[in-house]
Image (cartoon, grey):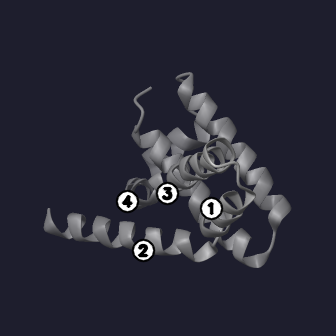
Amino acid sequence: MKLWSKEALVLGGIYGVLETPLSFLGFENTSGILFLLFILGMFMLCFNKTPKFLSNFISNYPKTSYYLTAIGWIPYFMFIVFVLLIGSGYIINYSDITVEYGMHIMFYPYTTIYLALVSLITALVRKTNK
C-alpha cells in the first residue's frame, strides 16, 4: 500500500465525518467504537486488504469520495500529533502539564472543523479551476 493512497484518505474522511457530530453530541462510547473500526481499517490497508465497503463507496460515489479524500488527512494528523505530544510530554520534559495541554488542543472539537473547512474550500477551488 502507498502511504497516502486514496483508500486511506477516504477512510479517514469517512471517520472524520462520522466522528465529529458524535463528539459534539457527547456520544463518547460510539465515538470510541468508531475509532476502533478506523484503526482496524488502517491495519487492513497496511496489509493490502481493502475493506469491501470502502471500494464499493469509492466506485459508487466518486464526487463524495473526492471531498472525503480532501478531508481524509485530518484524523491521521490528529492521531500523529497526539502521539507526538504524549511522547514529548513524558519523554522530553516529564511533565503532565504538557500532555494535558496537548490533549486539550487536539480534542478541542472546533480544531477538526477548522481544518475540514480549509480542506474543503481548497478542494472546491481546485475542482472549479480544472
Q: Against 18, is 88 above or below?
A: above
The Cα atoms of the two marked residues, 3 and 1, are separated by 16 Å
The residue labelled by disc 1 is 102
The Cα atoms of the two marked residues, 4 and 2, are separated by 17 Å
In the structure shown, which secondary structural element does the residue marked by tag 1 occupy?
helix
Q: Earlier in the sequence, mark 3 or mark 4?
A: 4
Q: Is residue 44 left or right of residue 123?
A: right
The Cα atoms of the two marked residues, 2 and 3, are separated by 11 Å
Task: Tell me the number on the disc at residue 63.
Answer: 4
| Count of picture labels | 4
The Cα atoms of the two marked residues, 1 and 2, are separated by 22 Å
The residue labelled by disc 2 is 117
Which residue is pictured at 46% across the width and 47% down the height?
9
The Cα atoms of the two marked residues, 3 and 4, are separated by 19 Å
> Looking at the image, is mark 3 or mark 4 nearer the viewer?
3
> Looking at the image, is mark 4 or mark 1 nearer the viewer?
1
The residue labelled by disc 3 is 74
In the structure shown, which secondary structural element does the residue marked by tag 4 occupy?
helix
Q: Earlier in the sequence, mark 2 or mark 3?
A: 3
Q: Residue furthest right?
A: 29
Crowd around label 1: few <14 · some 14–19 · many ≥20 (10 Å): many
Q: Amino acid at mark 3?
A: Ile
Q: Earlier in the sequence, mark 1 or mark 2?
A: 1
Q: Amino acid at mark 4?
A: Lys
Task: Tell me the number on the disc at residue 20.
Answer: none
On the image, the x and y values in percent for residue 129 come to 14, 67
Q: Earlier in the sequence, mark 4 or mark 2?
A: 4
On the image, the x and y values in percent for residue 26 come to 80, 74
